């Protein structure tokens, strides 16, 4: 069936759908010229959102970049710190090896630092990897990570004319430039500094200098520092070693500074043998002798000066002696019993040896204070007992060697037991021979730069003063500046 629509029925709808003339133009103009408030607000919000997203992206990028930079710097700092500490450990290994070399030498004290390498000898001598340098060793720390230390031979100072006779090289004084460096070179590297420390003779005090270096070594066929085997870190350390001297003020079982304060009670026994049982300085009175004393003579005096200070007996100050000791204590509970064979121990303060902690062992004991060996301590000691204070002894006690006391002395037996002190020069010699070899007298430290005359300029203080700066705590002696150009 076909549907036919009448034209008069469709025509009204057609007219209604046709836009009127000018209506579209007016509508477009209305939209462009008079936007609604809602449309403006939505447009503004969209632009703000875009800018906010852009700013967030920029800020996030900056934070991420800064974080990565911080992590990278922290990683580099940590790696550098570890490398520097590893280099320090390598340098310390060089100091220990050099210290052992000095102690091994059969001729003491050592006059020349000259490690030997002779693999053809029988037995082979392998004290160093390179005898021309001094004491040098390469060793593997980790795969592809190697260490090397060098303790170089003494480099002698270039001679000069001391025009003002002050014992120092001053800027402008003539010198012999043996290496054509254009400046006077002081003595450097490992060297004998006995004279600088005010000691006569050679080889008593040595200054050791060790350079420790850490290398990356991916190529095992090439030497350190060659090709890809590059240096990572390096540092220089120095330390001093010193021979222990023991020079009692007299040869006797007991050396007392003031004889009038010496009391030998019942069942006390001092035996000097071919030497004296008791010796003190002239003019200090007479001891109270109620016990047994023998010797040649049994007791006597020696003229002043009476050299019984720490510095005169041991050749060093108490501070230096502590640095050289096997143990230094301020707490009595930490003092060892026995002390061990051929060891040096320093006690700062008063100490009492009793049954729970007797004085036993062989070596040297220094007490900077009063020392008491209580009754029933059963102390048995060989060597040198030095008391910078008062000494009281009760039996049973047996001491062999020598006892040096700066204060009063009170020795007596207990019940049927004796307190015996025997002079033994052979024991003192054995202790000195065994312990008198070199000991560290300073801890390892990084040396300061040297002035042209060899004076150490710690923290560049002399250079700063020379530039006109006022130093905290007062300036250094002006004469030190003579080593610098005006």
Image (tube, rainbow, N blue to C red):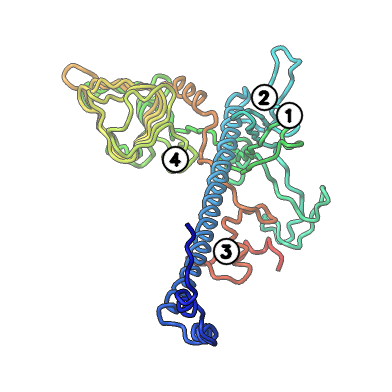
Report the Cα–Cα distance between label 1 and label 2.
8 Å
**Labels 2 & 3 near each other (Cβ < 8 A):** no
Q: According to the image, label 1 marks what residue?
A: 131
The answer to whether 195 is drawn above or below residue 437 in the figure is below
Nearer the observer, disc 1 or disc 4?
1
Q: Nearer the viewer, residue 296 or 222?
A: 222
Q: Earlier in the sequence, mark 4 or mark 3?
A: 4
Q: According to the image, label 4 marks what residue?
A: 307
Density class for disc 2 (Cα within 10 Å; few <14, some 14-19, many ≥20) is many
In the rendered image, residue 357, in percent from the top left (x then y), is placed at: 26, 26
Density class for disc 3 (Cα within 10 Å; few <14, some 14-19, many ≥20) is few
In the rendered image, residue 322, in percent from the top left (x then y), is placed at: 43, 39
**Which of the numbered marks, if any, corresponds to residue 477?**
3
The answer to whether 164 is drawn above or below residue 339 in the figure is below
Report the Cα–Cα distance between label 1 and label 3.
41 Å
Density class for disc 4 (Cα within 10 Å; few <14, some 14-19, many ≥20) is some
Q: Earlier in the sequence, mark 1 or mark 3?
A: 1
At a point 73% along the width and 47% down the height, the residue shown is 157
Q: According to the image, label 2 marks what residue?
A: 127
Q: Nearer the viewer, residue 276 or 59?
A: 59
Instruction: Give SS at disc 1.
Output: loop
Instruction: Give SS at disc 3.
Output: loop
**Labels 1 & 2 near each other (Cβ < 8 A):** yes
At a point 59% along the width and 39% down the height, the residue shown is 87
In the rendered image, residue 299, in percent from the top left (x then y), is placed at: 35, 28
Nearer the observer, disc 2 or disc 3?
2
The answer to whether residue 50 shows anywhere in this view is yes
Report the Cα–Cα distance between label 4 and label 3.
32 Å
Report the Cα–Cα distance between label 2 and label 3.
43 Å
Report the Cα–Cα distance between label 2 and label 4.
41 Å
């Amino acid at each position: 069936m076909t549907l036919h629509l009448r034209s008069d029925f469709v025509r009204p709808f057609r007219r209604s759908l046709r836009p009127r003339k000018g209506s579209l133009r007016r509508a477009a103009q209305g939209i462009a010229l008079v936007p609604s408030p809602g449309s403006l607000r939505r447009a503004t919000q969209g632009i703000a959102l875009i800018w906010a997203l852009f700013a967030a992206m920029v800020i996030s990028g900056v934070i991420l970049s800064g974080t990565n930079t911080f992590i990278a710097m922290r990683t580099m700092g940590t790696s550098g710190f570890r490398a520097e500490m590893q280099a320090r450990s390598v340098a310390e290994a060089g100091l220990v090896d050099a210290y052992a070399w000095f102690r091994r030498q059969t001729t003491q004290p050592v006059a020349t630092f000259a490690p030997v390498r002779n693999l053809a000898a029988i037995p082979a001598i392998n004290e160093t990897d390179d005898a021309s340098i001094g004491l040098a060793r390469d060793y593997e720390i980790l795969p592809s990570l190697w260490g090397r230390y060098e303790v170089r031979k003494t480099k002698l100072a270039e001679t000069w004319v001391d025009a003002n006779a002050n014992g120092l090289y001053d800027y402008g004084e003539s010198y012999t430039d043996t290496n054509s460096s254009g400046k006077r070179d002081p003595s450097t590297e490992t060297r004998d500094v006995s004279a600088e420390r005010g000691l006569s003779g050679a080889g008593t005090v040595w200054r050791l200098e060790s350079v420790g270096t850490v290398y990356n070594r991916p190529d095992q066929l090439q030497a350190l520092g060659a090709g890809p085997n590059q240096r990572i870190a390096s540092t220089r350390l120095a330390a001093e070693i010193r021979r222990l001297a023991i020079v009692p003020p007299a040869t006797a079982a007991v050396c007392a500074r003031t004889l009038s304060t010496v009391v030998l009670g019942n069942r006390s026994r001092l035996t000097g043998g071919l030497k004296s049982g008791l010796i003190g300085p002239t003019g200090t009175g007479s001891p109270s002798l109620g016990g047994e004393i023998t010797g040649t003579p049994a007791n006597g005096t020696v003229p002043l000066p009476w050299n019984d200070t720490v510095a005169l007996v041991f050749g060093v100050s108490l501070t230096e002696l502590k640095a050289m000791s096997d143990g230094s204590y301020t707490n009595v509970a930490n003092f060892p019993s026995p002390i061990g064979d051929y060891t040096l121990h320093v006690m700062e303060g008063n100490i009492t040896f009793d049954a729970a902690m007797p004085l036993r062992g062989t070596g040297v004991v220094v007490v900077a204070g009063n020392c008491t060996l209580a009754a029933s301590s059963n102390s048995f000691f060989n060597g040198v007992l030095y008391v910078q204070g008062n000494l009281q002894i009760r039996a049973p006690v047996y001491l062999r060697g020598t006892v040096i006391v700066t204060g009063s002395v009170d020795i007596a037996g207990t019940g049927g037991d004796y307190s015996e002190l025997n002079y033994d020069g052979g024991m003192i010699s054995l202790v000195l021979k065994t312990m008198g070899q070199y000991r560290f007298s300073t801890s390892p430290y990084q040396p300061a730069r040297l002035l042209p005359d060899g004076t150490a300029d710690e923290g560049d203080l002399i250079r700063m003063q020379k530039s006109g700066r006022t130093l905290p705590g007062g300036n250094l002696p002006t004469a030190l500046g003579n080593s610098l150009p005006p």
